[in-house]
Amino acid sequence: MAGGAGYVGSRLVPRLLAEGYTVRVLDTYFFGAMGLAAVRDDEALTEILGDVRDEGVVEKALAGVDAVIHLACIANDPSVDLDPELSKSVNYQSFRPFLRAAKSTGVKRFIFASSSSVYGVSEAPEVTEDHPHMPVSLYNKYKSACEQVLWEEANDDFIVVSVRPATLCGYSPRQRLDLTVNILTNHAVNLDKITVFGGTQQRPNLHIEDMVDLYLLMLEAPSRKIAGQAFNAGFENSTVMELAQMVRGEIASLLPDKYLHIETVPSDDIRSYHISSEKLQKELGFRPQRTIQDAVRDLVESFEAGRLLDSIDDDRYYNVRWMQKLVEPVAV
């Protein structure tokens, strides 16, 4: 798994191990190594400290591997914009060499983590997988370009599939608090207010554990059902203001002593789209099982249990702030 120590990987790797998979993680650990601390002693887990741009390390990581879940990237628009050349090299230029290394070492199935934000801004009532890509940021342009490379490198012996997730939410050992629902919940619990940036933008969301369930399904699904396919992966389509109201409502029931004011401020983030995940349900029988409220409850429980200390000021929860510090990769 490329990028297996990140926000999704640190939830996915333990599940794979619990399901009996042997897992090899390739990661720079740029955001630290604690995401996999709970499973680090598992004999079925191998961790390799390395960069997806290093072809020698990539070949070592892929040797003997049957399937790849490719999560590695510099994530989110502001982080990419900090250093466009670095981001291009990691998020795009390394991708074809990685795919070709996977083919040459005998990988049979390649699952790529794309993004539903490749659609950019759309007024279509339901954005399906056939909708044109209209990315409005470098991050999403690279995701879209990688998909084209993915299709070009596929063959009958190398099954590829692209997953286009909605914005994820919920708790992870490598927590991100720069995602919409997570931001709103953090502010509500720890600042006693909810700040909404914009508010009218449509944003699809998906609980992180549903994302984990979907990657497991992609590993096990018959090849004929996924080969060369892209799948939207979302559940609830809501405006940012509606999300804020959901968060306030759930926290009101969990922490009744809090009075939460919703404050609206302007935003230059124009991404807005309403994705359809009907294909995923129809062709693979997958339907998310968790809600925005479940994600809020998970986060509140984590705050209350002291798992997310100093969540407003600690830069490690915020990709762009952490990258601005130019932290070096750490050993595992």
Image: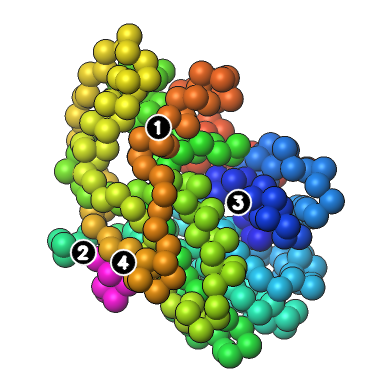
Q: CA distance from mark 3 to mark 1?
A: 19 Å
Q: Which residue in the structure is indicated by mark 3? A: 12
Please state the extent of the stretch shown in magenta in the rendering. 126-132
User: In the rendered view of the protein, which quadrant contains the C terminus?
Assistant: top right
Residue carrying label 1: 296
Q: Please state which amino acid type lies under the numbered disc 2.
A: Glu
Q: Quadrant of the N terminus?
A: bottom right
Distance between mark 1 and mark 4 Cα atoms: 25 Å
In percent of the image, x 41 and y 26: which residue is there? 186
Relative vertical location of residue 264 with respect to residue 214 in this rendering, above or below: above
Going from N to C along the chain, the mark reached first, 2 or 4, is 2
In the picture, measured across the screen, residue 314 lies left or right of residue 105, that is left
Mark 2 lies on residue: 126
Residue matched to label 4? 278
Q: Residues within 10 Å of mark 1 (few under 14, many from 20)?
A: many
Q: Is residue 162 above or below residue 254?
A: below
Which of the two labelled residues, at mark 2 and mark 1, occupies the earlier sequence position? 2
Task: State the image quarter where residue 40 is shown.
Answer: top right
Mark 3 or 4 closer to N-term? 3
Badge 3 or badge 1: first in the primary sequence: 3
- Mark 2 touching mark 4, by CB under 8 A? yes
Total marks in image? 4
What whole-number distance in Å separates the C-alpha atoms at marks 2 and 1? 26 Å
- SS for tag 4? helix
- x%, y% of residue 167? 38, 49
Question: Which color mode does the image show?
Answer: rainbow
Could you say where residue 210 lies in the image, as x and y percent from the top left? Answer: 47, 51
- Residue 270: assigned label: none
Residue at the limit of the structure toward the top, as seen here: 257
3 or 2: tag closer to the N-terminus = 3
What residue is rendered at 41% in x and 36% in y?
A: 294
